[in-house]
Image (cartoon, grey):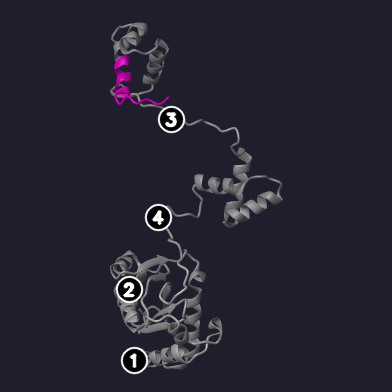
Amino acid sequence: MYETNKRLLRLRMEAVRMVRAGYGVRETARHFGYTPGTVSKWLRRAEGLPSNAQLIPTRSSRPYRHPNQLRDEVISRILEMRQERNQCAEILHHRLTGEGIMVSLSSVKRTLKRCGVSRFSPLKKWHVYPPRPIPKTPGTLVEIDTIRDGDPRERMDVYTLIDVCSRWAYAIPSSGADTWKSVRFVDEAQHAAPFDFETIQSDHGSEFSRWFTKRILERGMGHRHIRIRTPNDNAHLERFNRTIQEECIVRIPRNIRVWRKEIPEYLRYYNLERPHMGLGMKKPIDIIKLFPRS
C-alpha cells in the first residue's frame, strides 16, 4: 500500500498508544479515520518494535517469491560451476544448456550478481560514448595514443597521432606521459598539421583523463574515448604504432636525444614520400592537397 501522508508512520504509533491507554479499537479507528482491521494490524506490528519506538515503518510491497524465479537447485548449480573454475556467465550458460538446464543468459548473470560473485566491479564508471564521426575530410577524426618502451624504471614514451582520413601522422618522444604532456602534444601536432583538428579520439589511459578532455574542449575540439578493452577502435593508430616501431624505433639507439632527431626525419618520409596501401598507394600529403585549408 502506498501512502502520500508523510505523518502516517508517526500516526500509526499514536493510534497504538491510544489503544494501549484504554480506548477501544473501533473508537480509535473512528478517531483517525481508518478501519478497525487496519488499527488491529498496527497493534500486531507494534508488538515487535522496541518500547521506545516512535514510528511504525511501511513494509515493502515487494513479493516474497516470483512464479517464474529460478529453482533453488538451478541456483546452486550455477554457483557450483562458478566456484569450480571462476568461468564467465557465457561459459556457465553454455554448460548449463549442455546439462539440459534451460535458463537464460541474463538469469545466470543476475544470479551471479545477486550472490555477490559477479566480475563486475561497482567502482567502475558507466561510460557514454558519443557518435564516432565519419572521417570524410582531414581533421574530422584524429586518433591519439602512447607507445611505452622499457620497464617502469627506464621507460620511454612516444606520443603518436594519426588523422584517419589522410593518414597524416605525428609523433614526439617523451620521458613520461601525463595529462599536461598530452595537451602539449596535441598543441604541437595541431601547429604542425596542415589542417584543423575537430575530434580527438583516445583510449582510457590516465594521460587522457577528464582534465585532458576539458582542455581539449577549451581549444574548440571534441574528445571521445574508445570502448573499454577495444583497441581496434583505434585501429589506424595501432597500425601506425607498429609501423613506426618496425621502420624507425628498433633501428636506432634507445636514447631520447637520438629519438628526438630521428623520429621527425621518419615522419617527414612517412607523410611526404611513403606510399600507403590504404590510400591506393597515395601519400598522406596527396590526400591533404585534395582538401585545401580554408
**Viewer-proximal residue, 110 or 6?**
6
Q: Mark 1 points at which residue?
A: 257
Q: Marks 1/2: CA distance?
A: 20 Å
Q: Does the magenta stretch include residue 128?
A: no
Discs 4, 1 touching: Cβ within 8 Å: no
Residue 123: assigned label: 4
Dot 2 or dot 4: first in sequence order is 4
For discs 2 and 4, the disc positioned in front in the rendered view = 2
Side of 124 where 97 appears, left or right: right
Residue 74 sits in which quadrant?
Answer: top right
Q: Marks 3/1: CA distance?
A: 69 Å
Q: Mark 3 points at which residue?
A: 60
Mark 2, residues whose alpha carbon is within 10 Å: few (<14), some, or many (≥20)?
few
Residues drawn in magenta: 1-16
Residue 73 sits in which quadrant?
Answer: top right
Q: Name the residue under label 2.
A: 178
Percent across and percent down for residue 164 are 47, 76
Identified at 44% across, 90% down, the residue is 272
